[in-house]
Image: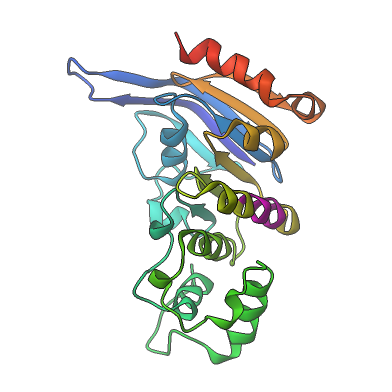
Amino acid sequence: MLELRDLTKIYNAGTVTELKLFDHFNLTVDDGQFLSIVGSNGSGKTSLLNILCGSIPLDGGDVLMDGKSIRKQKDFQRYVTIGRVYQNPSLGTCPNLTMLENLSLADNKGKKFGLGFGVSKKRIDFYRSELASLGLGLEDKLNVKMGALSGGQRQAVALLMATMTPLKFLILDEHTAALDPKTAETIMVLTGKVVKEKGLTAMMVTHNLRYAVEYGDRLLMLDHGQIVLDRAGEEKKATTTEDLLQVFNRYSIL
């Protein structure tokens, strides 16, 4: 279980542009929950993810996983058990390395590195099997450099890499925003499949209200660092895109 307790985050403290984004913010995410988060620009969506991942420091409060504080952990320490797929497909992969080399790096996340080979031939069939499950014909392109793939293909591989090792939490940071509509649909279908099959606890930030409604079992809307809508279970299932748009407009025009 993830717990965010009394989070406080102040940008540009002590200046004329000081902004207190989170003021004793609290949120609990149960194991196995798929949480979709929406909100206008500046609502705190990305800051919330960055705080969770340790990318930006807290000014107050704590972050707990399974009851243990991870506030003092560096971001690279948190990524041992947190997977993240970024908005920009190029951020989740190494463009100058082959797909095989990228998958090998992801496969060894959290393990100690020695002087042995980074790529294990014994794992190639496993990588092919994992790629085949994406349904994009990538299983025969292991020796192709990641930079030569399309944005959608790279994002699909980034999703696979992020979930290759055992995780406590999956972060989806507007991971379809840079893709064309058709490719975005493909990635969302893959996302739903991966989260369900691996039983992951996931948090997805998106500007696409339809995706927020159709995917996940809990829906949050943020506004200026506060939760203004929280629906789960049957209430979330009954929410339509039109319902969500009405609430969104109510806050975004203020």
Q: Percent position (x, y) of residue 144?
A: 45, 80
Q: In which quarter of the image is the N terminus?
A: top right
Query: Is 99 drawn above or below residue 242 in the view shown?
Result: below
Q: Residue 52 placed where, x, y %?
A: 47, 41
Please tell me which residue lies in front, 1 or 46. Answer: 46
Residue in the picture at 74% in, 24% down: 239
Q: Is residue 184 left or right of residue 70?
A: right
Question: Residue 151: image x %, image y %?
Answer: 46, 59
Side of 4 where 146 appears, left or right: left
Q: What stretch is highlighted in magenta?
A: 188-195
The main secondary structure of the magenta stretch is helix
Residue 85 drawn at (x, y percent)? 50, 53
Residue 218, compared with residue 74, is above or below; it is: above
Query: Between residues 194 and 83, which one lies in front from this camera angle?
Result: 194
The quarter of the picture where residue 14 lies is top left
Residue 168 is at least partly visible in this image: no
Kindly identify the residue that appears in the image at 34 percent across and 19 percent down: 20
Give the farthest residue toward the left: 15
